[in-house]
Image (tube, grey):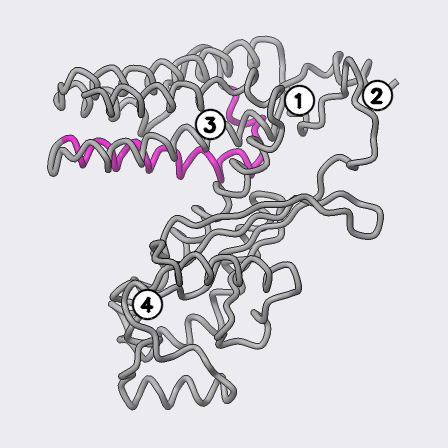
Amino acid sequence: MKTLAIALGLLMIGSAVSAQDAVNPDAAHIAKAQAAIKDLGQSLRGALVATMQAEGPVAAVNFCHDQAPVIAAQVAERHQVQIGRTAVRHRSPGNAPTEWQQAALAEFAAKAAQGSPAAGMSTQSSEVVDGQARFRFAQSIPTETPCLACHGDNVAAPIKAEIDKHYPDDSATGFKEGDLRGMFWVEFPIAPAAEPVSQNPPDQRAPILMSEAQRASLRLEMRGRMETLQGVMAALAAGDWAAVAKRAEEGTRGQHRGVDFRSALPQAWFGMARPMHGEFAAIQREAEGGQRIDVALQHLAQAGQYCTACHASFRPVTPAEYAVAQQ
């Protein structure tokens, strides 16, 4: 119970978006990168599974060749980042690691060699490139059982033939479950590191134009989302799985408080909101099924990260406020 209380306390700290971002601006950058990676991973996995179920495992190779780059580009657009996958032993020449990605892969490989699990590794840095400060984030990709069909040491002949057709220089086979397969990477521009810190720094978040009534309704919605997070935390701390399921279900949908504001929101907003709803749905399923606290906490933490990323990316403003700011 003490461990659970500590974990819930950490989650509560992670939900305090505005104060934490002001103290540690990298927290917002990390949350933004993790949200993009989560989106890419879920999008690729869902589409790949659907392809394999409909057309068989050989079709997975064609999917990765033709559709995976398209999905990555869509995720990049939604989150306003550069994003992709890379590995030392890569399949597509287009996924060959750059210099900074090679360094991240080497760091992960060293940790794995020392016995660290391949899952859950991450690293980040800020670099000035051509006069522009850029945030770089990498997260390890472990080899899971489904990966072995195309990346294991005993790839079926029809799949191997399709791989050779698309990737004659392929080196991404011979992996075993649990091996470090590669990594996701994310990169995006941030405020120049050389800029002096102002007592009143400008708000770098993207403005969303809406009426005062729409903004008030949006704030009610966000307050309700924080109440849902706190309600799930409290229910977990009490061991009340029925309450966990009930509060989590609230997070699977919008609360629709006040006037409609959704028509004013950009698509990138929904790129964070929809996966967040999915995390609450996963908590609800866990509460009604396995009832594993660690799993529920992982999904709750990810939901909080989507909230953090959203707050760090956007700010609602009225047209009058926007006009004054542009003067």
Locate residue 306 relative to residue 149 in the image: left or right: right
User: Which residue type does callout 2 highlight?
Assistant: Gln
Residue that mark 1 sits on: 209
Where residue 16 sits: x, y (%)?
48, 17
Image height of 74 relative to 269, above or below: below
CB under 8 Å between discs 2 and 1: no
- Marks 2 and 1, the one that precedes in the sequence: 1
Which of the two discs, 3 and 1, sits closer to the camera?
3
Question: Dot 4: few (<14), some (14–19), or many (≥20) neighbours within 10 Å?
Answer: some
Mark 3–mark 1 distance (CA, rounded to whole Å): 20 Å
Where residue 110 sits: x, y (%)?
46, 61
Question: Dot 2: few (<14), some (14–19), or many (≥20) neighbours within 10 Å?
Answer: few
Callout 1 secondary element: strand
Quadrant in which residue 59 is drawn: bottom left
Nearest to the observer: residue 49 or residue 97: 97
Q: Is residue 278 magenta?
A: yes
Task: Tell me what residue is drawn at x 29 percent, y 83 percent.
Answer: 155
For the N terminus, the image quarter is: top left
Task: Tell me what residue is drawn at x 26 percent, y 19 percent.
Answer: 5
Of the numbered discs in the image, which one, if any, rests on residue 307?
A: 3
Of the numbered discs in the image, which one, if any, rests on residue 326?
A: 2
For the C terminus, the image quarter is: top right
Q: Is residue 174 magenta?
A: no
Mark 2–mark 1 distance (CA, rounded to whole Å): 13 Å
Residue that mark 4 sits on: 51
What residue range appears in magenta? 261-287
